[in-house]
Image: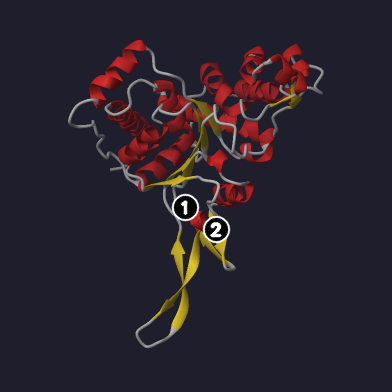
Amino acid sequence: MEETPEETWNRLQAIISDIRRETARVIVGQQSVVEQMLAALLCRGHSLLVGVPGLAKTLLVSTLGQVLGLDFRRIQFTPDLMPSDIVGSEILQGSLEGARRFEFVPGPVFTNLLLADEINRTPPKTQAALLEAMQEKQVTVAGTTRNLGEPFIVYATQNPVEHEGTYPLPEAQLDRFFFQINIKYPDLAEEEEILRRTSGMTMPTAQTLLSADDVLALQRAVVSVPVPDDIYTKIVHLVQSTRPENPQAPDMVRRYVACGAGPRAGQCLVAAARAMAMLRGKVSVSEQELKSVLHPVLRHRLIPNYTATGEGVSMEKVIDSLL
C-alpha cells in the first residue's frame, strides 16, 4: 500500500530524529554544526570545515558516515600529494602468460563521503584535481572518464591558525563549496562531558541507521519542500545587497566588500533553506530557516577589500548588516 504524503513526512522526521540521536552519542554539543553538515549533505553540497586543531572535525565526518551507512575515506593533504594520489592511476600489470596491460587502480575519491583533511596544505594542482571531481562528479585518467558513485560528498578541513607552508584556496574554487562551516570551542559543560566520554577504556560508537540508497531518497525528498514566493524575493534582494556596486547595498558592504556573491549563492540559499526546514520539521521554508543558512552560504563568497583587511573587519559582521 502506497504511503500518503503525511505518512512519508512523518517517516522522514523519524529518520532525522534517529540520525540526530545517534550522532549525539559520539559528538558532544556542536548541534548547529551537525545540522549544517546534514543540510549540505541533503543538498548534495560539499562543505569546508574551518576550526583550530583538536575540535573533532575528522570525528564529525566519520561519525556521520557511520550513521548514514556511507563508504568513508580520508585523505591527508600534504605538500607532496599528487593528483594521482586522489583520483587514481593506471598501473602496468603482468599475467602468468607474460602479457602486460594497464589496469586502473581507483584512488580514494571513489567513495561516498570523503574527508579532505587540511586541503590548504597541498599545491593548487592537487587541489584542482579534487575540486574537478567535486564539480563534475567524475575523473579522467589516461583519457578515460570514470563517474563517481552516488552520493558523493566532500568535507574539506582548514586550520585557520596555520599560514606558513599553506596554499589558500582561490575565491573561484571556494565558491564550489556549498557551505563554510566554522567550528568553535566547546563550552564548559560540553568540554567536561568530552573528557568523561573519552578518558575511559572504551570510546562511544554510533550505529548504522541508513544506507546509500536511503540517503539518496532523503536528497530527493528535500527538493519537494515548498518555498514561498516572498522567500525567493528576499533571497534575490539579499544576494544583490552583497554587491558593492549595488546602490541598495548596505554601507558595510560598500565599505568593506571587494566582490559580492554571484547567482550560485542564491541557488545555495534556496536549497539550504529547504534542507533546514525539513531537518526542523517545517512543512515549508520560512524566514527563520533562511537566516540560519545565510552565514554558512555567504561567508566564503564575499571577498573583503583592503580596508576590511586593514581594519580587521570580518565578513561575519558584513553579513550581519544584511539582516
Rendered residue at 44%/37% (across/down)? 221
Task: Place residue 55 in its image quadrant.
Answer: top left
Label 2 SS:
strand
Q: Nearer the viewer, residue 267 or 298?
A: 298
Circle 1 crowding by C-alpha within 10 Å: few under 14, some 14–19, many from 20 = many
Label 1 SS:
loop
Q: Is 271 displayed left or right of 34 in the figure?
A: right
Q: Which residue is at the far left?
A: 201
Q: Which residue is mark 2?
A: 139
Q: Which mark is residue 226?
A: none
Question: What residue type is disc 2 on?
Answer: Val
Circle 2 crowding by C-alpha within 10 Å: few under 14, some 14–19, many from 20 = many
Task: Place residue 13 in its image quadrant.
Answer: top left
Question: What residue type is disc 1 on?
Answer: Val
Residue 169 image point, x, y percent: 62, 38
Residue 8 image point, x, y percent: 35, 34
- Mark 1–mark 2 contact, CB under 8 Å? yes
Q: Which mark is residue 109?
A: 1
117 in relation to 191, above or below: below
Q: Nearer the viewer, residue 23 or 60?
A: 60
Residue 129 image point, x, y percent: 58, 52
Q: Earlier in the sequence, mark 1 or mark 2?
A: 1
Rendered residue at 24%/24% (across/down)? 197
Residue 1 is at least partly visible in this image = yes
Rendered residue at 57%/37% (across/down)? 177
Rendered residue at 61%/49% (across/down)? 128
Residue 133 image point, x, y percent: 55, 51
Tell me how the rendering is colored: secondary structure
* Quadrant where the C terminus is found in the figure: top right
* Quadrant where the N terminus is found in the figure: top left
